[in-house]
Amino acid sequence: MGEGQMRALVIGGGVIGSAIAWRLSRAGVRTQVYDRGQLGEESSWAAAGLLGPQAEADGPGKLLNLCIDGMNAFNAIYRLLLEESRVNPEYDRAGLVYVALDAKERAELEARLKWQREAGLKLEELSGAQARELVPALSPDVIYALHFAGEGFIDNRKLTEAYIQAALRAGAGFYPCSAVDEVLERGGRVAGVRMSDGTIKEADVVVNAAGSWASRIKGCAADGISIRPVRGQILCFDAPVGTLRHAILSPRGYIVPRRSGRLLAGTTREEAGYDKSVTLGGVAGIAHGVHALVPALGSVPLRQVWSGLRPAAPDYMPVIGPSPTLPGLYYATGHYRNGILLAALTAEVIAELVAGGTPALDLTAVLPARFSSNGTEQ
Ligand SMILES: Cc1cc2nc3c(=O)[nH]c(=O)nc-3n(C[C@H](O)[C@H](O)[C@H](O)COP(=O)(O)OP(=O)(O)OC[C@H]3O[C@@H](n4cnc5c(N)ncnc54)[C@H](O)[C@@H]3O)c2cc1C
């Protein structure tokens, strides 16, 4: 079968499924994306849009390496995405500023500086005064900061829309309000899916990009992949344009600006199942943190509060690659806190695998096979 005739079916129209649809369609694969709700309205809608592999890293290792590769992959395709989507997701690379308000937080940041420099990574130390010079809205209590030049943020809702528009222009089909119930097998390989209304959609390749719901889809159980939702709450403020031009991170939370002036403040990491409620405890914790970082936010209108469900695997690493039990089935889920950042890289890898190639990226840490019975992550 030539690649031109290959039919791919993607389950999930979030940032991951949409990015994959773009790459597959560009490669000449006939691609259809089914989402049980509206496109891009789950975790990909709820996120803050930080693109900060170094700023967000808790330590050296495979996740940091993957996120750096993810950032490079995104930077490499960004222009093409703008051209092919005609959507501007407002990517800002002014750098991320990670601040400390007391001695304990400063010690945490100095430890981060040390291991990152030892790992050969670039970052800059700032005094409290230097941090305020860069970000005038910062509290006078900021005593120290790290500046991650080259890292940044993006409007994740517009980014998902950009992938959708680019994929549509490349020939992909998107079907919202169409839930997939089961992945089907015939003759020892994937045959397509059964929708929740009982209809059958045939495909040569199925990509499970259903985010926090990925392991609820029938027909995937043999792979032993367990993805659970980890809730995160966000507060959105209507600040005057220019109140903040940099995203600020701290051990107490983060604030990410939008060009419209809106400021997104987060977040929580909660085990609450599929419950997307916002809670007083969550809101109070975030509000307390951001008020300490930027006191001026105390008088800015609070516009909206929401939450989303981050898809997490037991080892908090993404799950990207072929099913170890069913040829033709691929997974692209478990992106946890990094799906906005990792969408471009994930899509590239899936498109390479579907085309029968070997991705340049070492996939060992992300392969679905790590959860099967002879794996070590049971
Ligand atoms: C508060 C918060 C802040 C975050 N901040 C960042 C950040 O700053 N940077 C970053 O990189 N990442 C961030 N993330 C993580 C990021 O949002 C996720 O990793 C990413 O959105 C996952 O994308 P996805 O497409 O896999 O999942 P989703 O966007 O959840 O999409 C999955 C889709 O699958 C669909 N679906 C589910 N079941 C079915 C079915 N049976 N049939 C058909 N469709 C189905 C759903 O309707 C949904 O649209 C954040 C997340 C949260 C919650």
Image: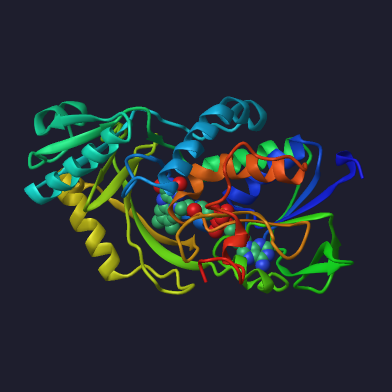
Residue sitting nearer the eye, 70 or 83: 70
Question: Along the horizontal axis of the image, is 43 left or right of 192?
Answer: left
Report the number of numbered marks.
0
On screen, residue 190 above or below 224: above
Quarter of image, res 21: top right
Q: How is the image coloured?
A: rainbow
Q: Give x and y (percent) for residue 107.
A: 13, 46
Quarter of image, res 146: top left
The residue drawn where x is 64% and y is 51% is 17
Q: Give x and y (percent) for residue 283.
A: 28, 63
Tell me the quarter of the image containing the N terminus.
Answer: top right
The residue drawn where x is 26% and y is 40% is 115
On screen, residue 225 above or below 175: below
Residue sitting nearer the eye, 353 or 148: 353
Q: Give x and y (percent) for residue 196.
A: 75, 73
Residue 41 seen anywhere in this rendered image of the structure = no
Residue sitting nearer the eye, 15 or 221: 221
The residue drawn where x is 78% and y is 59% is 327
Residue sitting nearer the eye, 188 or 108: 188
Question: Along the horizontal axis of the image, is 352 left or right of 16?
Answer: right
Give the residue at the far right of this rendering. Answer: 1
Quarter of image, res 279: bottom left
Q: Give x and y (percent) for residue 32.
A: 77, 51
Residue 220 seen anywhere in this rendered image of the structure = yes
On screen, residue 90 above or below 29: above
The residue drawn where x is 61% and y is 65% is 214
